[in-house]
């Protein structure tokens, strides 16, 4: 039986160092709840000595004492400073103030850093490590030692690199973590060095912490486990400084589903995709469609032969069952799709339809004709499903546009640069309103929702989260453009499309689809 592999998630600490990411304290609590639900072994929640936000987080946490289940919260900080007694070191005091049962302490193991950064002797650094570990364990803390730049250290002076880990062990650390801090090491070297450390320190738990600067963080983490490491650190969705950290949303299913290691409770694996997407939303980053296991394209099939193969035996083009990681299979309608793909999408809406029904051929014909005009339905499934509803006779227009006027301010005189006047008709009732926006599309979006919310209050929570424009040909100002809009109601996210030679008309078409899709979800019960 393969050993249990501890997972330490450092999304809240190392992940917060990603460019453009800034967690509020409330964001951190939301992510904490998701990680606890998932069942990781440790959550590295921050460095209480580095910033007021992390101190506030730990203070609030200790005041409320949430149920952490089997997950252990850890605080992060450095070894003590040279020439300072451990009980007088402010960094160690901050670590203890977090009141976590476990702490992660990082320290130097590369003789170059010992000389040039710490400016002390190799022996003095060994004593820094040993004293720090001993003091924290004497205060009742479980200590994990993160060995910075460990692979450079081992390459430079393997005996000294091992000695640093031994010093941590002698001081009472129960786990030492080999850090590929620069993300520069290749999997073969990670495996060889990890094996050497496991052999040299057989009674000590060995961990791995990788960065992705060479695109190898997942591979390196797995190489370390295969060489004997039983503790893996990383972040959800691989967020982190520079090129990011090892991606736990890939590593965990790889280790558990491919290699047979136990990392999280088996029943929790189906939470992988929902949690990865929830954390991406809180982080305010776009999760790549092609992200393994959790991306929207991870189990998407477009080519007719592939769709047919998956429908006959899913193992032909799927390496795991999508549901096992909380994801879903998608068949994409496009110009290269066959009848099987069209039928599968139609049956989501009308399950009892026959394969040879004329509606199937009609949907496929209409879709291919629109794609020839520039539509791209594989990136706009909400518009695709509305198209199917129209061909099946299930669609009803939820409003009629009576008048639309858009005015741009030039030059800008304030925060807003556009104004939209709109008049709509719903079941014979007129509504006239107007809105300002940061540009004409934003103004249209605000005005349309403002008018329709009177009749359809469920639209209040709908908001536009992404907007893309692509020029489809090169005919200067006569070019066709494609607009793609991402919308959410806070629970579900959907994508719509519009195509026209007029960018405002293309945007209008996508905006209308985004709101009508929400209304059709309610009408057909898709929200459940």
Image: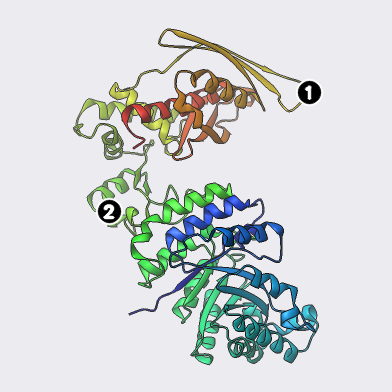
Along the viewing direction, whichever of 348 and 524 lies nearer the viewer: 524
Residue 425 showing in the rendered view: yes
Q: Which residue is mark 1?
A: 413
Where on the picture, by quarter, is residue 37?
bottom left
Eyeballing the image, is 274 above or below 477? below
The secondary structure type at the circle numbered 1 is: loop
Eyeballing the image, is 77 above or below 497? below
Residue 190, given in percent of the width and then of the height, sits at: 54, 78
* Quadrant in the picture for the N terminus: bottom left
In this rendering, position of residue 454 left or right of residue 312: right
Along the viewing direction, whichever of 330 and 69 lies nearer the viewer: 69
Where on the picture, by quarter, is residue 245?
bottom right
Residue 290, given in percent of the width and then of the height, sits at: 47, 51
Eyeballing the image, is 319 above or below 349? below
Q: Going 19% across and 31% down the picture, which residue do you hit?
A: 356
Q: Residue furthest front?
A: 63
Residue 251, given in percent of the width and then of the height, sits at: 46, 65
Q: Which residue is mark 2?
A: 314
């Amino acid at each position: 039986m393969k050993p249990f592999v501890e997972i330490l998630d450092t999304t809240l600490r190392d992940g917060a160092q990603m460019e453009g990411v800034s967690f509020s304290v409330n964001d951190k609590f939301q992510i904490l709840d998701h990680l606890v639900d998932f069942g990781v072994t440790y959550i590295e929640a921050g460095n209480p000595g580095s910033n007021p936000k992390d101190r506030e987080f730990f203070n609030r946490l200790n005041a409320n004492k949430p149920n952490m289940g089997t997950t252990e919260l850890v605080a992060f900080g450095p070894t003590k400073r040279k020439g300072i007694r451990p009980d007088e070191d402010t960094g160690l005091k901050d670590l203890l103030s977090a009141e976590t049962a476990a702490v992660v302490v990082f320290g130097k193991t590369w003789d170059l850093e010992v000389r040039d950064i710490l400016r002390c002797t190799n022996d003095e650094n060994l004593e820094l490590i040993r004293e720090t570990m001993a003091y924290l364990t004497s205060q009742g803390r479980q200590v994990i030692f993160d060995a910075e730049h460990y692979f450079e250290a081992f390459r430079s002076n393997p005996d000294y690199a091992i000695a640093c880990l031994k010093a941590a062990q002698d001081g009472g650390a129960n786990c030492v973590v080999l850090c590929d801090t620069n993300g520069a090491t290749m999997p073969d070297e990670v495996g060889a060095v990890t094996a050497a450390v496991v052999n040299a320190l057989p009674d000590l738990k060995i961990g791995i912490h990788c960065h992705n600067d060479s695109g190898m963080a997942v591979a390196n983490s797995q190489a370390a486990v295969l060489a004997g490491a039983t503790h893996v650190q990383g972040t959800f969705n691989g967020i982190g400084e520079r090129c990011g950290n090892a991606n736990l949303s890939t590593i965990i299913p790889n280790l558990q589903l491919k290699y047979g290691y136990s990392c999280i409770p088996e029943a929790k694996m189906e939470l992988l995709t929902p949690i990865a997407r929830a954390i991406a939303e809180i982080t305010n980053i776009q999760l790549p469609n092609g992200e393994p296991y959790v991306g929207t394209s991870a189990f998407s099939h477009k080519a007719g032969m592939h769709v047919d193969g998956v429908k006959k035996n899913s193992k032909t083009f799927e390496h795991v069952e999508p549901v096992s990681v909380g994801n879903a299979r998608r068949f994409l309608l496009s110009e290269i799709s066959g009848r099987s793909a069209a039928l599968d999408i139609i049956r989501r809406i009308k399950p009892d339809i026959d394969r040879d029904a004329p509606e199937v051929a009609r949907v496929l014909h209409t879709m291919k004709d629109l794609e020839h005009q520039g539509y791209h339905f594989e990136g706009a499934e909400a518009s695709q499903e509305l198209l199917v509803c129209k061909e099946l006779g299930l669609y009803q227009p939820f409003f009629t546009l009576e008048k639309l006027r858009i005015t741009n301010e030039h030059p800008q005189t304030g925060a807003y640069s556009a104004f939209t006047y709109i008049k709509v008709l719903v079941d014979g009732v007129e509504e006239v309103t107007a809105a300002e926006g940061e540009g004409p599309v934003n103004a249209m979006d605000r005005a349309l929702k403002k008018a329709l919310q009177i009749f359809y209050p469920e639209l209040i929570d709908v908001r536009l989260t992404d907007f893309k424009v692509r020029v489809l040909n090169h005919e200067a100002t006569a070019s066709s453009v494609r607009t793609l809009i991402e919308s959410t109601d806070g629970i579900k996210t959907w994508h719509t499309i519009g195509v026209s030679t007029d960018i405002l008309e293309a945007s209008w078409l996508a905006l209308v689809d985004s709101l009508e899709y929400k209304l059709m979800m309610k009408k057909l019960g898709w929200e459940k």
